[in-house]
Amino acid sequence: MAGNNKRAIIVGIPGVGKTTVINRAAELLSTLPEKRKAAVVTYGTIMFEEAQKIGVKNRDEMRRLPVDQQKKLQETAANRISQMQDDVVIVDTHLFISTREGYYPGLPMRLVTIMNPTNLIMVAADPAEIAKRRKNDPTRQRDEASAEAIKNDLDFSKMMLASCSILTGAPFAIVVNDDGKVDEAAKDVASILANGEMSK
């Protein structure tokens, strides 16, 4: 990447408003005098586009592929993201997937090192607020979780993100998206990715 270019991996558990914050931050970056062009990519979407090239018709079919094939698709997607040359590349992804066997990392070492991020950002919120948002979102079918379980997921996310930071040498930041304050959260993200050029 060019000297001032950024590649940020932004994560957040369901209900924190990650995608909304990311999209607003990208809009803010484009309003800078330097016109920082931000490309927002969803890791799962890039992976599915690669899967379609080998005949996969939908995401459910992709999830049923043999593990070795899924790993190849993950790496192909990571390589594609690593080659993007926009001023700011924002990767919207999940840090982990909760399975019956435990937490499965969405960013294992091989993928995070391929993408080689300049920044790692976690969008967080108060556990009780997250529980309320999940309950009140009719567009998604999400498992109900207690505020305590959500707090555990947030704590675990911080540990995993710190580990990614150690592996890549990229700084990590936690941005809080409180109720009704999505613009402030987006401004915090944009400020991090604009080399501190945005006024608070």
Image: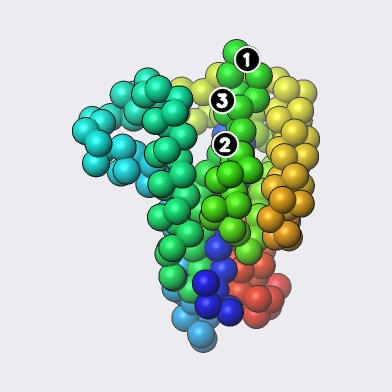
Q: Residues within 10 Å of mark 3 (few under 14, many from 20)?
A: some
Give how far across and how far down residue 70 sits, in percent.
42, 31
| Distance CA(mark 3)–CA(mark 1) | 25 Å
Read off the residue under disc 1.
101
112 vs 14, nearest the viewer: 112
Give me the disc on residue 135: 3
Give how far across and how far down residue 134 sits, in percent.
56, 29
Residue 180 lies left or right of residue 29; in this view the side is right
- Residue 43 visible in image: no
| Distance CA(mark 1)–CA(mark 2) | 14 Å
Q: Give yes or no for contact between labels 3 and 1 (Cβ–Cβ under 8 Å).
A: no
- Of pointers 3 and 2, the one earlier in the residue sequence: 2
Image point 53% across, 77% down: which residue? 2
Nearest-to-viewer mark from 3 and 1: 1
Give how far across and how far down residue 78 sits, in percent.
47, 50
Image quadrant containing the C terminus: bottom right
Image point 21% across, 33% down: which residue? 55
Q: Amino acid at mark 3?
A: Lys
- Of pointers 1 and 2, the one earlier in the residue sequence: 1
Kind of element beneath mark 1: loop
| Distance CA(mark 3)–CA(mark 2) | 24 Å
Q: Amino acid at mark 1?
A: Glu
Residue 185 lies left or right of residue 1; in this view the side is right
Residue 90 lies left or right of residue 70; in this view the side is right
Q: Residues within 10 Å of mark 2 (few under 14, many from 20)?
A: some
Q: Amino acid at mark 2?
A: Gly
Identify the residue at the far bottom of this view: 33
Read off the residue under disc 2.
106
Task: Choose top left, top right, bottom left or bottom right for residue 98.
Answer: top right
